Image (cartoon, rainbow, N blue to C red):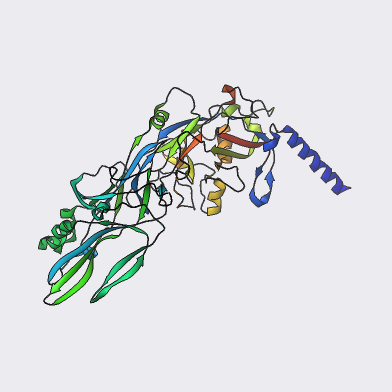
Amino acid sequence: MKFFRIDLLTLLISLFILNSCKNQDTVGFTLGTKGTLSGSLVDTATIFTKTTTDDSVVTSAITKSPLGYINDPVFGTTQADLITDLNLPGSVAYTLPAGTITIDSAVLILKYTQGFYGDSSAHNTSKYVVNVYQLAQKQASGGTYYSNTVWPHQGTVIGSTSMLNYTFAPRPNTKVVIDSAVSGKPDVPDTIPPQIRIPISKSFINSALFGASSAELNSNQIFQNTVKGLYITVDKTQSTGVGGIMMVSGADSLAVYIRSASGTVIDTAVVYLPTTQYFSYIHAVRSTVFQNAITNKTTLTDTTVYLQGLAGSRVKVSFPYIDSLFSNRNVGGVNNVIVNRAELVVTMKPVSGDIPGYLTPLPRLSLYMLDIAHQRIELPDASGLSTASGVEAFGGFYSSIYTKPINTYHFLVTSYLQNLITKRLVDYGTYLAPTDTTNLSSVDVTPSAQVAARTVAGGGYSHALSILTPSNPQAYSMRLNVIYTKIK
């Protein structure tokens, strides 16, 4: 009898909870293998959203650097130019090879890494020409440089993929076969990691290295001061198609293939001039639609918002009437409510002219807040996370298949919302922003130059301002799903 009464009580409580929910179709949040959390559901919170520009981002000392040009029909054009240093072989004093030196070829090597965004070789509609110029000023070793730092360079092209009369399509996953020089033997085929190989002018190499003064050859610093470095950019006038942004990793080298003749003996060799640091200069021309979204100050909230990688744009999110979220729920005030679970849902929104085949949504978004000094900090729900499972639970990953509704991003904001409605937290600004997928052990709050994708999403929504009923919210609108329990 004791167990029967307990079961009956459980059944009655369950029926009461289900009856109190306003939207029976969406009661409960799935919690993986742990089942479903039930309670009273409210999903009618008013959300205001505004697209804003993001802050400039440090592009020195990052693990992957953007290079490319993309003509996005929705966002406009974005270009990322690459800046690098150039050093003596081994970055130390260099002794020229004996004999008469002849340059066969010189190639600047840029190694691909994951993160290409745009029209890839599979579509075969975009082709690229990359040009190389000599910098007009030397970068400081170990200096901090931002995405909006302008780098003056000489006007003469010293290297280009067009020197061999070809354009190329990015192939970040395709290995390259080259002829490798072997001292005293014929060249042999060699398969190397995916990379961009840009021919460099022989006259530049002769002037910079083999014609250098003894002072320049005896000191890497003096050599750097003379050469200054390289400026690498996509030539828009010779490239075709929508284009794309490539990611290159680490530093590499400028490989110089030479023959040295001493009497009747001719030997071949490769001299490598290391490139030890990369920086990116990112600049854009926004489309009218995108620019209007950023400058629009006349509406309370935008129905469409724009999130652009490469530190392009972010979205401010606010909950202006959160104090009255439970005012019609007969709970007697927010202090009588415990938020069991709160989830912010962001839905991708199709727009005219988009090309979803290869201009795919951002794989991950970040959600962060500002403190009283307007510095970026993690939400309470994201603070202190140190494992991949914790970061995954907080959310922000794009969902196109599997358990969640497709084309959405979900964020767990339970503690954030509880603190907001009870005044333990002041909203100095809360933002959605692009973030890279590299870091899986914490939630990044700083802008990133390591992801080039973008997302168009549904903006904020106010049921009070809409003729639609709460049970039928506007398609694609951002929403806040809250499951709560009345405690008094």
Whether residue 280 appears in this view of the structure is yes
Q: Nearer the viewer, residue 482 or 258?
A: 258
Position of residue 468 in the picture relative to residue 311 (left or right): right
Quadrant in the picture for the C terminus:
top right
How many discs mark residues in the rendered view? 0
Q: Residue 9: where, in percent of width, then height?
A: 81, 41
Q: Is residue 88 above or below residue 54?
A: below
Q: Residue at x 46, y 37 (%)?
A: 354
Position above or below: 475 against 110: above
Please tell me in which quadrant of the rendered image residue 214 appears.
bottom left
**Which image quarter: residue 277?**
bottom left
Residue farthest toward the right in the current orientation of the protein = 1
Q: In the drawing, does residue 330 fall left or right of residue 158?
A: right
Tell me the residue at 56%/53% (across/down).
389
Q: Position of residue 475 (x, y in %)?
A: 57, 32
x, y percentage for residue 126? 37, 47
Query: Which residue occupies the foreground of this view, 226 or 208?
Result: 208
Residue 40 lies, in percent from the top left, at 69, 35
Query: Which residue is at 60% across, 26% downward?
Result: 324
Q: On the rendered structure, is 175 left or right of 318?
A: left
Is residue 93 visible in this depiction of the protein? Answer: no
